[in-house]
Image (cartoon, rainbow, N blue to C red):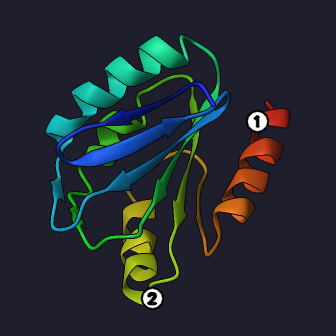
Amino acid sequence: MKGSLKFDFCDMTIYDTYLVVVVKEGIDITPNHNSLLLEITNKYFSKKPFVYTTYRLNSYSVNPKIYYETSKIENLKGFAVVSSNYKAKENAQIEKLFFNKPFEIFTSLADAISWTDKLLSDH
């Protein structure tokens, strides 16, 4: 693990090839949140391939427009959603339509990490 960061809207844990984000209850994720993501990726992944993993433990909303900008992060190779909640998985299926890179939905964090390892070994 490279680090753990806490913000008013989420907690992030940064590893060598991925980051895990837990968004806090009731937050509305908008394209404005991308500036923070860019800062984090530039600092910790500096042109190194990585996967963004959202661990959906809480209920929150995501504006799908965020994925247009997120897709532009060159070294972002994939996006993983981890949740056991049916509604969160259904929402992620819709969000997937707005993202033009690999985007997968998992029930366990371990499965998401395995997918990340395989995805990055293919690059």
Residue 85 placement (x, y as % from top left): 45, 84
Image-quadrant location for residue 24: bottom left
Residue type pointed to by label 2: Tyr
Residue 10 seen: yes
Q: In percent of the image, x 39 and y 78: which residue is there? A: 88
Q: Name the residue under label 1.
A: 120
Is residue 31 toward the left or the right of residue 69 in the image? left
Is residue 47 toward the left or the right of residue 30 in the image? right
Residue 122 seen: no
Residue 35 placement (x, y as % from top left): 23, 26
Image-quadrant location for residue 57: bottom left
Q: In percent of the image, x 51 and y 17: which residue is there? A: 44
The residue closer to the viewer here, 74 or 24, is: 24
Q: In percent of the image, x 52 and y 81: which residue is there? A: 84
The residue closer to the viewer here, 101 or 39, is: 39
Residue 99 placement (x, y as % from top left): 44, 50
**Between discs 1 and 2, the one toward the N terminus:** 2
Residue furthest to the bottom in view is 86
Quarter of the image for the N terminus: give it. Answer: top right
